[in-house]
Image: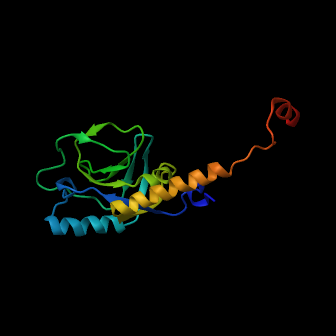
Amino acid sequence: LLRSFFQKPNSTELKLVSVSGAKRFILNAGKMEASVARQRAFKSMIIVTPQADRMGLRLAGPKIEHDAKGYNIVSDGIATGSIQVPGAGEPLILLADRQTTGGYPKIATLITADLGRLAQMRPGSTLRFQAVDKATAIAALRAQLAALDAFRDSLRPAISPVDTASLLAAN
């Protein structure tokens, strides 16, 4: 029932939702070129580096160059799954223990439905991104929640009816 939800992340494709706004145009190019370069980076194979913990994962792949304004921007809130690009140009995907605000540009955010799969990826794992729209991200989360609800509803006690004597006798 929940095979795709609970299986190990042997599939390397994770879906991304683009973050709209000026901060995504941080590449050393104009808006149109930045969009093309960003799409190229998303289609490249990315490797999870050993620099990974509950705060986030550092990725190795095509370097993302910042424009002349640099990489320090005004700090703002950071959602779980945000992809920041610090000065070295190697993206970070921020996870559960991330900081609450940050001043590096954010180019995208991993969809909520894929956060669990990302958190299971080990150093040396490869991944590829797929940009999706907000409606697709919401649909994926709803499908995941529906699968979890169906799984929960399918659970039955091992012994019916459950009482203390029956439980003690089963042990």
Location of residue 139 in the rendering, given as x and y in whole percent from the top left corner? 43, 60
Give the color scheme: rainbow, by chain, secondary structure or one colour: rainbow
Residue depicted at 81% across the width and 29% down the height: 164
| Left or right of 84 on screen, residue 155 | right
Q: Nearer the viewer, residue 97 or 143?
A: 143
Vertical relation: 81 (above or below) 133: above
> Nearest the camera: 134 or 80?
134
Question: Residue, x 37% and y 56% (percent of image)?
Answer: 60
**Quadrant of the rendering where the N terminus is positioned:** bottom right
Q: Could one spot residue 125 in this view of the protein? A: no
Q: Which of 150 and 77 lies nearest the eye of the viewer?
A: 150
User: Could you tell me residue 108's position as x and y percent?
Assistant: 30, 55
Q: Is residue 7 left or right of residue 73?
A: right
Q: How many marks?
A: 0
Residue 127 vs 54, above or below: the answer is: below
Please identify the residue farthest to the left as the structure is shown: 68
> Residue 79, located in which quarter of the rendered image?
top left
Point 52% across, 63% down: residue: 11
Residue 125 place in picture, x, y as percent: 49, 57
Which residue of the protein is positioned furthest toward the front in this rendering? 161
Q: Residue at x 19, y 53 (%)?
A: 23
Where residue 150 appears, as percent x and y from the top left, is 61, 54
Residue 64 shown left or right of residue 130 in the figure: left
